[in-house]
Every structure is written in structure tokens, then in C-alpha cells.
């Protein structure tokens, strides 16, 4: 195995990835089969906990060796202190742009019920006292930024794009169901857009993921449409490449954060200069591997998880097709990569 292409130049301390967003403390229950009904108590067969929300992206990026800088808000409470320690102490994420909220604002908590290949969420919390533009200010030089675009444009994204930062954007579900196409105007600042198929079709007013992808290629250099159990499709206008990647046949334990792992993995492979097909297959693989563990952020496989999976494939006489599909990993996995990342450390519960 050989070293992957380096991230940044020697001596460069600028972030590879700049992130900002809302942090949650996640408590995940798995093995439920179905959700509870009023008046009923059911027992889960598994449980996990750890940082969630924007932490999903940050941890996934850091575990692939990217210098990751995160601007978020921590509550001055047990959950906030725990999340800060995990992100900075265990994962090595730069939290210098982050802030601790004044007393009285608590770290939001999400309870996730993993139901088959999906999940239901219940969150308690309030809007943070600092917005993303206030947290970031004048954005530092960064090779990329992973952003979540919404109805209102964020000033810091425009500043970052103008300074040469490559913007990778996703978008969330629109509860109003209006799917305003005005949101797509923000793609003029972006290098890549990575919505899921439902979002892509709704915003482009198309009937199929393929049609949505074609519409998005007119708006952004790199368009990706994720399709859950059907994998993903993508077009890179800069290189003229089109790619498809099938999802892995994996028994899903918990899908929390899988989309975030996909995005961070795609950024890592893009910064390393891989061909589009490899970028897409790598992101689909990492996303799939994350669903085999509890939780969002701490389920990210990192290089250790990818290397362990690849060793299993190489040793399996019946995995010839997977060896052909993912053979590029033999030249991409770093030399001497360690074991898979650990499970969540002791939690405050």
C-alpha cells in the first residue's frame, strides 16, 4: 500500500476543512424493531451516545487525516464539556473558533430511535446564542468548507468562496414543502452540491434522480445525488466524468450520520485528487461502514475502519467482485494505518 496524496503542503497549518453548525449530544437506541406507543415502555437491544449534529462531519473528516476546524456552540454543562473533550482531546479537532454559551443555554440533546434502515429523532434544545456568521467572522484560509445551505444565505460562505475555499454544500428537508428554487442560487458559490434524491428532485422539479442530476450540472461544477440503498450518482463538469456507485449490502444497525460520513469522505477523496468514480465509491463505502456502529460522529470508520474492511475483502475467496470494484484502495490506504476508531468513551449518563 502507498501513501495517499498529501493534504496541504509541508508546513501548511491552514485547515483542510472548515465547518460550522449546531452541535448535539446524541443518545441512540438500536434494535427496537418498532417505535413505542403512548403508555408503553419498550427495551432496546443496544445503545450508544456521543457528539452529534455538526460533530458528525467534523469527526468523519478528522478520521481521514484532514486538519479540521469547527466553529460551534457548547453549552456550559455536562454534555457540552463531554463533547468538547471528545472532539478536541480524542479526535484532534481544532475548536478555536467555537464558543461556550452563557449559563442558561444548554447543549441540545437528541434521542435517536434506530428503526430498521431509518431512524426517528426527538430533540430538546433552543437556538444557539451565536449565529454562524458571528462564529466564523472573516473565515480563515481553508482548502475546503462543508456547509449546509438554507433559505437565508450566509455571509461567511460568500467570503470563503471569494478567498478560494472550495465549498461543498448539502441541504436539509424543507418542512414547508415549498422547495423554493431561490435556494439553488447559492450554488454559484459552491464547488460541489451533495443532496439526497428526494431533496434533489424536489428542488429541481424533476421526477427521477438522473433528471435531477442533469439539472444540477448546470448550476455547480460537481453534482452528486445520494440514493440511500441504491448508492449514488455524480457528474464532475471540470473533468467531464460521470460516475455511479452501488451501495454495499450491509446489515444496518444505525443510519444516524451516514449522510455526513458520505460528505466528509467525498471531500477527503476530492482533496486527494482521486478520479470521480473512486471518490464516489469511497464515500458510499465509508457511509455504509458507519451504519454498522451506534451513533453518528463516533461511528465514522476513518482509515482504520476502511483498512479493516479491505483486509476482510482481500481474505474472502467469494469477494472477487468487491476486490475488483474497490481495488483502488490498495493504493490509497495509508501505510501503517492503525486499528478502527474506538467506540464512544465513557459518557456523562
Image: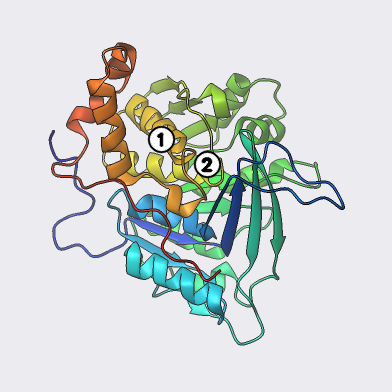
Q: Quarter of the image holding residue 132?
A: bottom right
Front one among 184 and 23: 23
- Would residue 191 be seen by someone viewing this image from the given angle? no
**Residue nearer the viewer, 80 or 10:** 80
Give residue 241's position: percent from left, percent from top: 38, 22
Quarter-of-image position of residue 282: top left
Quadrant in which the N terminus is drawn: top left
> Residue drawn 34% across and 70% down?
89
Q: Is residue 316 above or below residue 268?
A: above
> Residue 52: x and y, percent?
53, 58
Whether residue 304 is situated above or below residue 277 in the rendered picture: below
- Give me the residue at 45% from left, 24% from top: 248
Could you tell me which secondary element the residue under label 1 belongs to? helix
Asked if 220 appears above or below 15 in the picture, the reply is: above
Residue 68 in the image: x percent, y percent?
A: 35, 60
Which structural element holds mark 2? helix
Residue to which mark 2 is pinned = 259
Front in this rendered view, residue 42 or 263: 42
At 45% from the left edge and 41% from the top edge, which residue is drawn? 290
Return the x and y of residue 2 as percentages of the image width and height. 12, 36
Q: Is residue 203 visible?
A: yes
Total numbered labels placed on residues in the image: 2
Q: Which mark is residue 48?
A: none
Which of the two labelled residues, at mark 2 and mark 1, occupies the earlier sequence position? 2
User: Where, quadrant-wise, is the C terminus in this rendering?
Assistant: bottom right
Callout 2: 10 Å neighbours few (<14), some, many (20+)?
many
Mark 1 closeness class: few <14, some 14–19, many ≥20 residues within 10 Å = many
Residue visible at 52% across and 41% down in the picture: 259
**Image position of 16 (left or right of 194):** left
Would residue 264 be found to the left or right of residue 99 on screen?
left
Q: Which mark is residue 283?
A: 1
Amino acid at each position: 500500500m502507498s501513501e495517499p496524496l498529501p493534504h496541504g503542503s509541508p508546513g501548511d497549518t491552514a485547515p483542510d476543512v472548515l465547518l460550522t453548525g449546531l452541535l448535539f449530544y446524541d443518545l441512540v437506541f438500536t434494535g427496537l424493531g418498532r417505535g413505542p406507543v403512548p403508555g408503553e415502555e419498550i427495551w432496546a437491544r443496544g445503545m450508544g451516545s456521543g457528539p452529534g449534529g455538526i460533530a458528525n462531519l467534523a469527526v468523519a473528516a478528522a478520521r481521514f487525516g484532514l486538519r479540521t476546524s469547527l466553529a460551534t456552540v457548547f453549552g456550559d454543562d455536562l454534555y457540552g464539556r463531554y463533547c468538547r473533550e471528545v472532539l478536541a482531546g480524542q479526535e484532534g479537532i481544532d475548536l478555536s473558533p467555537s464558543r461556550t454559551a452563557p449559563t442558561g443555554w444548554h447543549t441540545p440533546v437528541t434521542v435517536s430511535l434506530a428503526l430498521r434502515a431509518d431512524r426517528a429523532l426527538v430533540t430538546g434544545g433552543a437556538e444557539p446564542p451565536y449565529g454562524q456568521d458571528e462564529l466564523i467572522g472573516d473565515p480563515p484560509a481553508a482548502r475546503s468548507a462543508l456547509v449546509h445551505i438554507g433559505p437565508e444565505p450566509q455571509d461567511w460562505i460568500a467570503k470563503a468562496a471569494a478567498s478560494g475555499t472550495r465549498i461543498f454544500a448539502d441541504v436539509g428537508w424543507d418542512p414547508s414543502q415549498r422547495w423554493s428554487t431561490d435556494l439553488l442560487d447559492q450554488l454559484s458559490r459552491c464547488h460541489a452540491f451533495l443532496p439526497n434524491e428526494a431533496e434533489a428532485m424536489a428542488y429541481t422539479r424533476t421526477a427521477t434522480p438522473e433528471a435531477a442530476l442533469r439539472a444540477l450540472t448546470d448550476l455547480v461544477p460537481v453534482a452528486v445525488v445520494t440514493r440511500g440503498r441504491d448508492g449514488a450518482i455524480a457528474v464532475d463538469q471540470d473533468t467531464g466524468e460521470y460516475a455511479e456507485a452501488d451501495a454495499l449490502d450491509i446489515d444496518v444497525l444505525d443510519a444516524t450520520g451516514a449522510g455526513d460520513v458520505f460528505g466528509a469522505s467525498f471531500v477527503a477523496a476530492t482533496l486527494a485528487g482521486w478520479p470521480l468514480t473512486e471518490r464516489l465509491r469511497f464515500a458510499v463505502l465509508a457511509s455504509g461502514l458507519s451504519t454498522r456502529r451506534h451513533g453518528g460522529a463516533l461511528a465514522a470508520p476513518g482509515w482504520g475502519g476502511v483498512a479493516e474492511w479491505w483486509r476482510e475483502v482481500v481474505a474472502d475467496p467469494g469477494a472477487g467482485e468487491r476486490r475488483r470494484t474497490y481495488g483502488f484502495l490498495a493504493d490509497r490506504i495509508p501505510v501503517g494505518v492503525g486499528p478502527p476508531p474506538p467506540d464512544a468513551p465513557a459518557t456523562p449518563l
